[in-house]
Amino acid sequence: MKQPDKMTSVFAKDNPPQSCGPNGSFLADVMTGLASCHKSLPAKYFYDATGSKLFEAICALEEYYPTRTEIGILETYADEMAAAIGDNAMVIEYGAGSMEKIRILLNVLTDPVVFVPVDISEAHLIAAARGLCLNYPDLDVQHVVADFTKPVLLPAPSRPVARRVVFFPGSTIGNFDPNQTVEILRSIGDTIGPGGGLLIGVDLQKDEDRMVRAYDDAAGVTAEFNLNLLARINRELDGDFLLERFRHVARYNRDLGRIEMHLQSSVNQAVRVAGRTFNFTAGETIHTENSYKYTLAGFDDLACQAGFRRDQHWTDEGGMFAEIFYNRTR
């Protein structure tokens, strides 16, 4: 088994880390999003080192129910989930972050062959993987820096695996529209191959006020998280956003069944990024994130389109959140 000082980093040529330099995809995506009629920025760029730490703080907030609710489900039903995953599995976590939730499963899984945390934030991923190795010295950990919205090239395991299973917690899948979700699920199917499994967290539809408060906390941590995206553009792309001229907005779109996060300009202003000027009118917003809320049947439909069939699911007593295990059918 792999010891902590032998933890493996993987930067597969088909899955390079996101480049955020002047010639990288960050710049291209920012330029495209700010030039659009309805300005937007991809949510994946929230997660630089500062953004990752702020998100951990959000997860600890009283208003932010998804984290503690999902942890409660995992702790209550971990043995059943481990049985669904099976023995001698390769376990791949998408959007691994702090790797706190996977510990609940690692404590009950039978002889996992390798754990593969996947995340776009390299520094945060490496630090979390090192911490995990200290607590699980016999676990083979091979972390992959990659954008999980595309097929992930997995490292070769040190011994045969019974199946590949993706663990995708945190309702991160809700950040994508339904069409994108189907494509990501298909990509997961390609990654895990025939006989693979998917254990995924899905935030369910519930009281509207409760959902909005989860994305607009009283302490302003989510606002700081949202505004950090502009600060990152300033740092990395020679932007001159004045953060005090933008405010965080969270609202529920009933027609589309999603929470939306925006950054709203408080005045008419011009902002420069990498030498290009973008004009804002007072009240105009930059759409930064969606979080879709589903019914079980609604998410099953998307999973079915991607070649998955629900095997089991687990929810909290209030029915706010679901952990769903799917088997790949094709």
Image: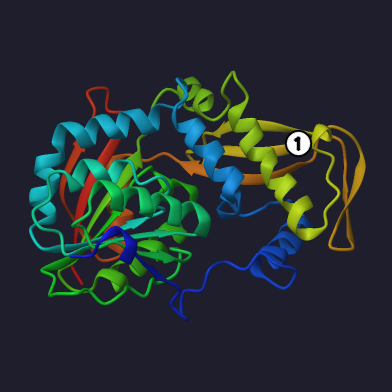
Camera-side residue of 130 and 53: 130
Q: Residues within 10 Å of mark 1 (few under 14, many from 20)?
A: some
Identify which residue is drawn at 26% across, 46% down.
135
Q: Where in the figure is residue 243, as x and y percent of width and height?
A: 79, 37
User: Visible in this render: residue 82?
Assistant: yes
Question: Residue 72: which quarter of the image?
Answer: top left
User: Visible in this render: residue 250?
Assistant: no
Which residue matches tag 1?
A: 264
Element type at mark 1: strand
Identify which residue is drawn at 39% across, 27% down.
206
Q: Residue furthest bottom?
A: 13
Is 117 drawn above or below residue 256 in the view shown? Answer: below
**Horizontally, is 42 left or right of 175 in the view?**
right
In the rendered image, the quadrant that contains the C terminus is bottom left
Identify which residue is drawn at 52% across, 56% down.
123
Identify which residue is drawn at 29% across, 57% down.
303
Q: Where in the figure is residue 254, as x and y percent of width and height?
A: 52, 34
**Horizontally, is 156 left or right of 248 in the view?**
left
**Horizontally, is 281 left or right of 119 in the view?**
right
Q: Residue furthest front?
A: 5
Question: Residue 179: which quarter of the image?
Answer: bottom left
Which residue type carries mark 1?
Answer: Gln
Camera-side residue of 167 and 21: 21
Q: Where in the figure is residue 51, as x and y percent of width and height?
A: 58, 44
Visual colour scheme = rainbow
Camera-side residue of 259 and 168: 168
In the rendered image, the quadrant that contains the N terminus is bottom left
Is 178 drawn above or below residue 188 in the view shown? Answer: above
Q: Where in the figure is residue 44, as x and y percent of width and height?
A: 56, 54
